[in-house]
Image: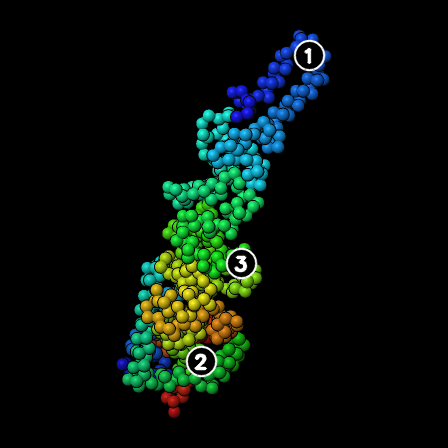
């Protein structure tokens, strides 16, 4: 696991033109890539079944080789997501840097005030830039959304995997709930991660056409300073002290 | 035979009139004197001709009375037989159109019902009944002269009699149907209960293996739904109205729609001819029998399956817990979408403002954003 990022993070205030800071380790990028691929396939094959009456859904099912093909795409991608989850877990256990990232992503009370200030700053144009840290409140929300979402989808998906085993062991209402949970949580994930996350990393805050961190692991210091004002200020203050 | 000569009955009136005109004194002298009478006579002759061609049974049955011969034949046709039938208003030659002269020497060709009932005949021609030797033609089900008579005993296609009619050939199916919940209900006088034709159709009847058949896997839920999706009928008998809609939202229906013809339809679980109420211990859908019924496709179903409510809809009265989950998510996702809209607005506003500041700074020579 790449753990060089920690020292780089401390040096990020020395702003040189074209200077970059390390945002994601190779491990995290692999984890993210596997998750992005799995979730894309899961959403495509899942929504295709949920909306099988629509022409676009039928086209997708046809692309995946019919209903049976869709079935295997969905289940293979589910295993892919499970592996990405294991990547995350082992990363957290093995790497100090990942542990530090996890510490940064923990929700704090001042996230709410920071998000509020961010909104106020955007709408009024007055005051200071929002005091966002290493992770913005939006990024934190997305992280925890992914985590809880994957756990919920994992549990409900496992119970739906073989309905006979589930019905032999649980009452039918459990299966009824899991079916609704799996379908609606999927829509929640679609809005939060596909629409919102893609907007954030490709459009928002000067990221257009994209924030390269998911591929190179780095982002420009200038962009970082604009998006993570507090983190930048703290580091500068530390350096000056 | 009545004392007709060998002339055609149909042409006789014209000839009789001709003979009258030719008899007596000079035509030229009488013509003027009898002009009014000729006019009256000619007009009535014309009307008589018209009347004949319209084949009004009341007026022509006298001149076209086939019963003198046919009442005595091996299969007698009498006026009594005809008068209660739905064809009571028609003349014999309307159906037996091949007959040109009376009496007729040869046996006329079969009646073409399709000349009036075109759609029904067309449907029949496409059915297996049309190609299988010995299978019924129109008269095989509807009978002949007493067709649709207002006498239940004689009307073979009266709803109560249809199953017995089909039994003549389909006795095996009839044996399983006659104890079914549908047959029992019909016997009790509940006229909406299904008989053979309600599921299989009438003239264009097709086997389940033919695509487009009413009992083919792809269409059977619509066929059952014709009654079981009809709120008014089902509520009358206290039968749930959501059987078809809950099936259609199931994976079984999705698989079926996507072309998996092995996926379960109504008949896979409930049976076809021998459908029984789920409260009946012999029913396929009785909780005791569910493991066996589901086990036909899903190996390893245990008795714990029993008591499971299959047809549940996600609603406050159906799967309530699942309904709460759905409502929670609807609210949650709505808030999320609103948040997303606010987020985009805030982000776009910020970007626009930055651009303005940058432009102002450039024009006043202060440099870029940062």
- Tell me how far mark 2 sits from mark 1, CA to CA: 118 Å
Q: Chain of mark 1?
A: B
Residue beneath label 1, please?
B31
| Residue found at x 54% / y 61% | B234
Pair 2/1: label in front: 1
- Residue at 31% over, 72% down: A79
- Chain containing mark 2: A
Q: Quadrant of the C terminus of chain B?
A: bottom left
Closer to the camera in the image, B3 or A180 = B3
Say if labels 3 and 1 share a chain. Answer: yes
Asked which secondary structure carries label 3, the reply is loop
Where is residue B26 drawn, in percent x and y?
Answer: 66, 8
Q: Nearer the viewer, residue A142 or A185?
A: A185
Left/right of residue B267 with respect to residue B318 in the rendered view: left
Q: Which residue is mark 3?
A: B188
Mark 3 or 1, closer to the camera: 3
Q: Chain of mark 3?
A: B
Q: What residue occupies the far bottom of the structure in this picture?
A: A241
Residue to which mark 2 is pinned: A137
Left or right position of B328 against A30: right
Secondary element type, mark 1: helix
Residue that lies at the very extreme toward the left in this rendered image: A1
Q: Earlier in the sequence, mark 3 or mark 1?
A: 1
At label 1, counting other C-alpha atoms closer than 10 Å, the crowd grade (few under 14, some 14-19, many 20 or more) is few
Foreground residue, A180 or B351? A180
Q: Is residue B269 above or below residue A100?
A: above
To the question of a shared chain for discs 2 and 3, the answer is no
Mark 2, secondary structure of its residue: helix
Relative image position of residue B10 (x, y in whole percent): 55, 24
Q: Residue at x 42, y 62 (%)?
A: B270
């Amino acid at each position: 696991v790449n753990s060089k990022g920690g020292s780089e993070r401390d040096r990020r205030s020395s702003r040189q033109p074209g200077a970059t800071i390390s945002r994601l380790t190779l491990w995290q990028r692999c984890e993210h890539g596997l998750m992005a691929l799995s979730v894309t396939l899961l959403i495509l094959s899942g929504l295709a079944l949920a909306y099988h009456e629509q022409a676009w859904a039928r086209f997708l099912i046809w692309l995946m080789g019919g209903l049976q093909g869709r079935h295997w795409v969905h289940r293979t991608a589910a295993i892919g997501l499970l592996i990405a989850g294991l990547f995350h877990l082992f990363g957290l256990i093995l790497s100090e840097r990942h542990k530090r990232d996890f510490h940064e992503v923990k929700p704090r009370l001042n996230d709410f005030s920071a998000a509020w200030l961010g909104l106020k700053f955007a709408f009024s144009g007055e005051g200071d830039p929002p005091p966002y840290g290493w992770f913005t409140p939006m990024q934190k929300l997305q992280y925890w959304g992914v985590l809880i979402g994957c756990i919920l989808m994992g549990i409900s998906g496992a119970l739906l995997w073989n309905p006979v085993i589930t019905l032999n062991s649980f009452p039918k209402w459990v299966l009824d709930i899991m079916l609704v949970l799996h379908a609606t949580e999927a829509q929640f994930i679609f809005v939060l991660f596909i629409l919102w996350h893609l907007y954030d990393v490709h459009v928002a805050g000067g990221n257009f056409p994209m924030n390269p961190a998911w591929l190179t692991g780095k982002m420009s210091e200038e962009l970082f300073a604009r998006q993570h004002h507090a983190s930048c200020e703290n580091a500068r203050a530390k350096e000056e002290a | 035979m009545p004392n007709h000569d060998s002339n055609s009955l149909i042409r006789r009136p014209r000839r009789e009139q001709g003979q009258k005109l030719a008899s007596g004194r000079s035509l030229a002298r009488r013509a003027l004197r009898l002009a009014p009478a000729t006019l009256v006579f000619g007009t009535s002759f014309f009307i008589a001709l018209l009347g004949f061609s319209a084949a009004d049974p009341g007026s022509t049955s006298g001149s076209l009375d086939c019963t003198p011969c046919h009442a005595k034949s091996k299969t007698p046709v009498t006026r009594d037989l005809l008068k209660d039938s739905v064809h009571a208003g028609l003349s014999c030659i309307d159906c037996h159109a091949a007959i040109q002269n009376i009496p007729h020497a040869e046996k006329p060709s079969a009646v073409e019902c399709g000349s009036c009932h075109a759609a029904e005949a067309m449907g029949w021609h496409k059915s297996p009944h049309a190609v299988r030797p010995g299978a019924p033609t129109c008269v095989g089900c509807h009978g002949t002269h007493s067709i649709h008579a207002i006498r239940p005993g004689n009307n073979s296609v009266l709803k109560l009699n249809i199953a017995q009619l089909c039994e003549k050939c389909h006795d095996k199916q009839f044996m399983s149907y006659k104890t079914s919940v549908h047959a029992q209900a019909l016997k009790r006088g509940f006229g909406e209960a299904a008989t053979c034709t309600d599921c299989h159709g009438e003239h264009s009847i097709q086997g389940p293996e033919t695509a487009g058949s009413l009992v083919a896997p792809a269409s059977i839920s619509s066929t059952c739904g014709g009654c079981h999706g009809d709120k008014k009928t089902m509520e009358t008998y206290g039968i749930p109205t959501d059987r078809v809609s809950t099936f259609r939202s199931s994976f079984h229906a999705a698989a079926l729609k996507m072309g998996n013809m092995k996926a379960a339809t109504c008949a896979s679980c409930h049976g076809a001819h021998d459908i029984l109420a789920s409260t009946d211990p012999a029913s396929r859908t009785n909780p005791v029998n569910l493991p066996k019924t589901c086990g036909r496709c899903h190996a390893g179903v245990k008795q714990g399956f029993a008591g499971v409510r299959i047809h549940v809809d996600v609603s406050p009265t159906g799967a309530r817990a699942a309904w709460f989950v759905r409502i929670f998510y609807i609210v949650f996702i709505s808030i999320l979408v609103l948040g997303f809209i606010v987020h985009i607005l805030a982000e776009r506003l910020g970007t626009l403002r930055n651009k303005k500041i940058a432009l102002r700074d450039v024009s006043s020579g202060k440099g870029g954003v940062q």
